[in-house]
């Protein structure tokens, strides 16, 4: 059976073959299989060396000090650790976030509200971006943390993190950024970008699922309270035996992403142009999110007179999404699209098409033809 064309790279990426080949070396007896915390024999030293090399590779992509990288099970855990860890013990803390964050941030902030923390929920502009002016207007004397994503996972819109970071650094307020969708898609330099905490995920960058990292700034020193207690691993911030093979996979994937960043971005820009130009003749099509401040690989489109569910059913030869993978079990319209001002009917018409490193010109051509054909067919039977 012929596989559908994969256009859901924002949900997850396939593991790069070079990453998979490297990971295999860290599983069995003839490889480096030991516990990285075993410091009494050569097996443990080898595993620890592999973990520390991967830490350098992840730090390299975001221009951080390797000592600022804390391993986690993924961006969801990183978000939880950053947000809960930053406000822990602060009796009257105030947190600022937005209504279009990933569920890992939204649900964590809602949980904090239940613990008595005050949360301000910013509404983005129609292009899916939060501005420094909005953040400044929401600041209070007791604001402990601002948490905003760099790239929106449904729209691809890019928020001006540097401008917001400069504002918050001047006010002495901690800034957490979910960069799961940004890593490997745009340049990230924490040396020039005043960010205190930054969440990363391997599986969005052609690495394995189940591993991620949290960048925790050392200068000025950021203190967060651990949320998982045990052996005091990761400088006391995150206990648990480290999965060497997954960490090596993340390190290899991030090193590849750094090496291929310009090439990947240029390729995706060309694919995006081909995709949108191919659909340009289709009446009643609109782009959701920012046309300028965005990553090239995520395109969110609405089609007048066609609901997304029917369109997805018609596009059986394409693997696409009507929203983020974290919310796809619900039939509610996307909270992100409602957050940028679309009504339920408009939000129900939107599909996210996301491309990646292995998307080809032929696949884009095929996708365009399929969309034009199915949209036309669905409109004709209305």
Image (tube, rainbow, N blue to C red):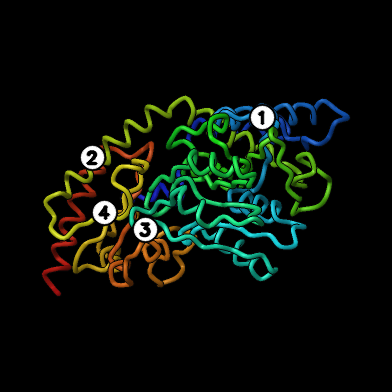
Q: Secondary structure at mark 3?
A: loop
Residue 17 vs residue 295: left or right? right
Pick the residue in front: 297 or 109.
109
Local packing at callout 3 (Cα closer than 10 Å; few below 14, some 14-19, many 20+) is many
Q: Is residue 318 at all visible to an observer of this figure?
A: yes
* Residue under label 4: 287
Residue occupying image coordinates x 66% and y 65%: 117
- Say which quadrant the C terminus sits in: bottom left
Pick the residue in front: 38 or 56.
56
Residue occupying image coordinates x 64% and y 48%: 73
Tag of residue 321:
3
Q: Earlier in the sequence, mark 2 or mark 3?
A: 2
Q: Residue furthest right?
A: 40
Q: Position of residue 120 (x, y in %)?
A: 55, 62
Q: Position of residue 36 (x, y in %)?
A: 77, 35
Pick the residue in front: 54 or 344.
344
* Residue under label 2: 273
Q: Earlier in the sequence, mark 1 or mark 2?
A: 1
């Amino acid at each position: 059976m012929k596989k559908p064309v994969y256009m859901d790279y924002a949900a997850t990426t396939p593991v790069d073959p070079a990453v998979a080949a490297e990971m295999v070396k860290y599983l069995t007896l003839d490889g480096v299989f030991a516990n990285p915390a075993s410091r009494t024999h050569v097996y443990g030293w080898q595993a620890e060396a592999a973990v520390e090399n991967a830490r350098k590779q992840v730090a390299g992509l975001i221009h951080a000090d390797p000592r600022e990288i804390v391993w986690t099970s993924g961006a969801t855990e990183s978000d939880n650790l950053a947000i809960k860890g930053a406000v822990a013990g602060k009796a009257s803390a105030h947190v600022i976030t937005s209504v279009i964050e990933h569920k890992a941030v939204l649900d964590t902030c809602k949980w904090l509200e239940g613990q008595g923390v005050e949360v301000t929920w910013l509404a983005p502009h129609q292009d899916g971006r939060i501005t420094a002016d909005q953040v400044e207007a929401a600041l209070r004397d007791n604001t402990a943390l601002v948490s905003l994503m760099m790239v929106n996972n449904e729209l691809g819109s890019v928020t001006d993190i540097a401008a917001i970071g400069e504002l918050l650094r001047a006010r002495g307020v901690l800034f957490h950024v979910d960069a799961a969708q940004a890593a490997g898609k745009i340049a990230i330099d924490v040396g020039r970008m005043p960010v205190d905490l930054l969440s990363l995920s391997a599986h969005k960058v052609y690495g394995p699922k189940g591993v991620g990292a949290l960048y925790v700034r050392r200068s000025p020193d950021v203190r967060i309270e651990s949320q998982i207690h045990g052996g005091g691993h990761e400088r006391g911030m995150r206990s648990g035996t480290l999965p060497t093979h997954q960490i090596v996979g993340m390190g290899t994937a991030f090193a590849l992403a750094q090496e291929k960043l310009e090439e990947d971005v240029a390729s995706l820009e060309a694919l995006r142009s081909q995709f949108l130009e191919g659909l340009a003749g289709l009446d009643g099509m609109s782009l959701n999110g920012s046309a300028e401040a965005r990553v090239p690989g995520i395109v969110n489109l609405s089609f007048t007179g066609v609901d997304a569910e029917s369109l997805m059913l018609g596009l059986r030869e394409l693997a696409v999404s009507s929203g983020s993978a974290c919310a796809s079990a619900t039939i509610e319209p996307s909270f992100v699209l409602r957050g940028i001002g679309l009504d339920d009917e408009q939000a129900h018409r939107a599909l996210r098409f996301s491309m990646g490193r292995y998307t080809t010109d032929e696949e884009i051509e095929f996708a365009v033809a399929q969309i034009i054909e199915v949209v036309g067919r669905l409109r004709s039977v209305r």
